[in-house]
Image (cartoon, coloured by chain):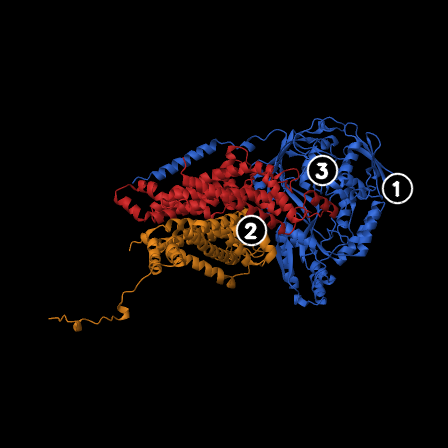
Chain colours: A blue, B orange, C red
Amino acid sequence: MPRPGLAWALSGLCGLYALGAGCRRPDAAAPPEQSLRISQRNEPATLDPQRATLPDEFFIIRALSEGLLVPAPDGGEPRPAVASGWDVSADGRTYVFTLRPDAQWSNGDPVVAADFVFSIHRVLSPALGAPKAALFFPLRNAEAFYAGREKDFSAVGAQALGDHLLELTLEEPNADFPALVASGPWIPVHPATTRKYGHVDHRGNDWTRPGRFIGNGPFTLAAWRPNQEIVVVRNPAYRDAARIKLRGIRFLAFDNGDSEERAFRAGQLDVTLAVPFSKLATYRAAQPPVLRTTPLYETRYLALNTRRIPLNNESVRRALGLALNRTALVEKVLQGGQQAAFTFIPPGLGGYQPQWHVEEDAAEARRLLREAGYPDGRGFPPLELTTWVNTPVLEAIQQMWRQELGIEVAIVQREARTHLAALFAGDYDLALVTAIPDFNGASDLFTALKSGSPGNYAHWSSVEFDQLVTGAGRAGSAALRNTAYQRAEKLLLTELPLIPLYFNTQNFLVQPRVRHWQTDRLWTRFYSDLSVD
Amino acid sequence: MVSLSPQSLPSAELAPDQLERGTSLWRDAWHRLRKNRLAVFGGFVLVALALLCLVGPIFSQSYQEQNLDLGAAAPSAAHWLGTDTLGRDLFSRILYGGRISLVVGLVATVVALTIGVSYGAIAGFFGGKTDTVMMRVVDILYALPFTIFVILLMVFFGRNIFLLFFAIGAAEWLTMARIVRGQVLSTKKMEFIEAARALGLGRARIIFRHIVPNILGPIIVYATLTIPAVMLLEAFLSFLGLGVQPPMSSWGVLIKDGAEKMEEFPWLLVFPGAIFSLTLFSLNFLGDGLRDALDVRSSKD
Amino acid sequence: MLPPAMLRFLARRLLQTVPVLFVIITATFFMVRFVPGGPFTAEKEIPPEILRNLTAHYGLDQPLWRQYLGYLGKIAHGDLGPSFKYANRSVNEIIGDKLPVSLELGALSLLVALLAGLPLGVLAAVRRNTWLDYLASSVGMVGICVPTFVLGPLLVLYFAIHLGWVNASGWYGWSDRILPCLTLGLVYAAYVMRLTRGGLLEVLNQDYIRTARAKGASEYRIVLRHALRGGLLPVVSFLGPAVAGILTGSFVIETIFQIPGLGREFVTSAFNRDYTLVLGTVILYAALVIACNLIVDIVQVLLNPRLKFE
């Protein structure tokens, strides 16, 4: 019987090859002029600046709208945006912002102070359920209005003194206030648009769709295909439109770091959000350099449940902290340029420099453990270290504790929300946690650790700490505030309800054709100066 | 002259060992299987792998001891198959992982087989309302969200590896039941079943001693397909944080890790993948051999 | 014109669908709520007042039975509710956007699976235990031994990055369909091939095949006209639920190739505790499974002359 099969197979293969060679890959063949493709790792749940919570959502929001101020890339004083400047009263309680006369919404309406008052009213409306409303609480009566105690919004410290003058009155002087104003949730919304598509503070209000979204930023929303791409195009009505060289940006959805990197290599993507671990070394050696490393104000730490034995014993906690080798963790395990963390607050956050550092001393750790009643780890109860992100750092830590202290800690990987629910409920022993501040200031990291705060996963309570943090919040000057913080942090790092491990960095890839890519240490994006060759 | 009187005939009693040995389906099958060299080879490889994974770790290096200075290293004299990114010996990790994967594969498949075959056979045999209700129950169970089911199991019953087997087995028996039911529906109309019924054999006996042995072919084939599916499902669950805990790993997890690093450290993918494929090929040959052996009509004897 | 027996069968099965769906919806509704954590459990904790407002807006503070009844009422009108995670998007909208993508991915992959698996399976069965059988079986085994999360990236590395013929990811042009459907199709092709081979082998030794051979029919005719009907039985039984699964997308393929399909939502909605989306996807999947099983049962009767519509 003849063997037609083989002949068919061969000709089929030849045919495929010919077909394929004729195929041009659509996306990479000729990169579109002055158009950028940026990776978007998390699908935004919303593009409403007052309902957004994730940095990923603000990536897009910051392309579409801007607030009174924007953060400075180098982390210093916030820079003017819609506001050209501000004045502070002598007692530090009243701020008057001067708005630029040429600031416009994308439909031509001028941006006026009343828009900001409207936005603040909206964000503080209890019905909206704005998750970041706490960033507005420094305003006088803001918290009371939000909680429903104060019914009249005019009692809240936000007033328009004219079209281009906005007066904001605080409960108490707050050195962090400009940084708060520069944060994402302070970006205003266009009043008429929110009114048009439903009740203003109704959660179902659908004004953020392409074609409806009105913003005052460098780009407008052209298309939103969920889990595929979000397209923004240049906004000619922007106050600084002459400076914008890009015609548009496409935010391409990627769920997976490996797919993202492959797309970058294939020329389909200009900027990624991360780099797969195993590729770091390759990209470091690559020419021309495409790898960027940005240190972040992000602390990765181990929360210790101070309500459980033996973690309620301070000596045990300190022993666990002393027995680590953070340098080995960041250099050998992570290899991504992370910084070993010997403090909880990243140095430089909001101008704060920590004073007290944790130490590493294995011998002292063993001594403390013996003192606590577990010589050489004997009798130490088996503990679980839970996480929802599986990182080799934990396995290395497990090994370090086994070697130095002789104790066994099991790693338990839980599904994300089960893990978080357990954290809030105190249903864990040790847990890997990430702390990211909402704005360029240390206060929300500190307030999260106050007694009873939901972010206080260690369920730790210290009256002295609470007092120091509350006092720091009231401090008039940055210097006084920082001193109070330093004392609070010293207390924190002595009692050690949490063990700081490292400060995260962002490693990402940028194609050589992209110019002027800037980020700061808080995931803020700066789109105005971007261009491509 | 030979006398033909009854007294001169040889005794009617024959010594037992002179009786021709009666034989059964299973004995014949075993005999045929032994002659199938490919199947025997497959069986040997499987047994050897299982023994290696069971006993090997006792003699090999630790699977969890890290060597941070070494990092991921290519195969060498010290580490026969290389090391992973934390400097752990890959050979030992493969052996330890084999324990998990092989046991998961075996236990979950046995669970799926037992439940699936019985359920499908009963449904197919009885037909009518029983069949309808049973198959609708299968439809319901099939549509329920598996991820949530596993999360619930983990939450309510803790992290027990046997729970993992149970969860996976619980997911796989449904399709097996459907296949078995389909086969039974056609087999039960065959003449030999009618004959059995006419003989007055009990229903359980008919189902399990007459029908099931005759449909073992597709069952075995599907079982050999279920085992790799189970191993990969376990890897999927680990990827979602619901499976084996670090530093322990299984072949599925090793392969997944290796796939992420395959350009820089190819041995991390190649070796676990090769062992995984070898196991599956052996399983395949053995399964085919079993199928051939049990198929009465295909025999040449 | 469909025979009356089949019509009665269809009618009966469609009627049975109602209680089945009802049980599925109820079971899932309560299952998701027993899992710890809710849609608003987040790493950056939400202040309790805000949590209260959110819960009230979505009606999550009402007693469970009232939420359940309210949900049933909405479903009766075809409204699957708002997504909890994606503000302003309804579940109907999300499924409406993603289902066509998954259907296309699934259908094309199924085509690949059948076009590759069926002929290979037939070939392997007819030429049993020859080198052709081993070759075909080995090719089939590739789909089983090489998991999708290995095969996918390998194909991308070679065809998209090294050769530059297609995109590495995305779902824009027709060329974006090739790699994902190949990857997904090959896995199912392996199943189809093995089950076809197994099923055919069972049948090829039956008496009626022997009769046909004795009558002098050619091998092709025997296989195609006589053996295939019975031999396809296991494949068809398997394909029922498999088709439903492949049509609702594959999580791994959609992640590797960044395809905006429904497969990801099946998994991520559970992780996000997006109750309404979980229920929406489950209902959709259930409807598909029931439909596919129904078709399979009909096909089984058609294939096997001994069977009747019961």
Q: Which mark is residue A202?
A: 3
Disc 3 residue crowd, few under 14, some 14–19, many 20+, Cα 10 Å: some
Q: Quadrant of residue B30?
A: bottom left
Q: Identify which amino acid the numbered label 3 is placed on.
A: His
Q: Quadrant of residue A41?
A: top right
Q: Which mark is residue C159?
A: none
Q: Name the secondary structure under disc 1.
A: loop
Front residue of A385/A163: it is A163
Q: Name the secondary structure under disc 2.
A: helix
Front residue of C224/C13: it is C13
Can you identify the residue that label 1 sits on? A91
Alpha-carbon span between mark 3 and mark 2? 39 Å
Disc 2 residue crowd, few under 14, some 14–19, many 20+, Cα 10 Å: many
- The answer to whether A76 appears left or right of A232 in the picture is right
Name the residue at 44% across, 59% down.
B48
Q: Is residue C71 visible?
A: yes
- The answer to whether C200 appears left or right of C19 in the picture is left
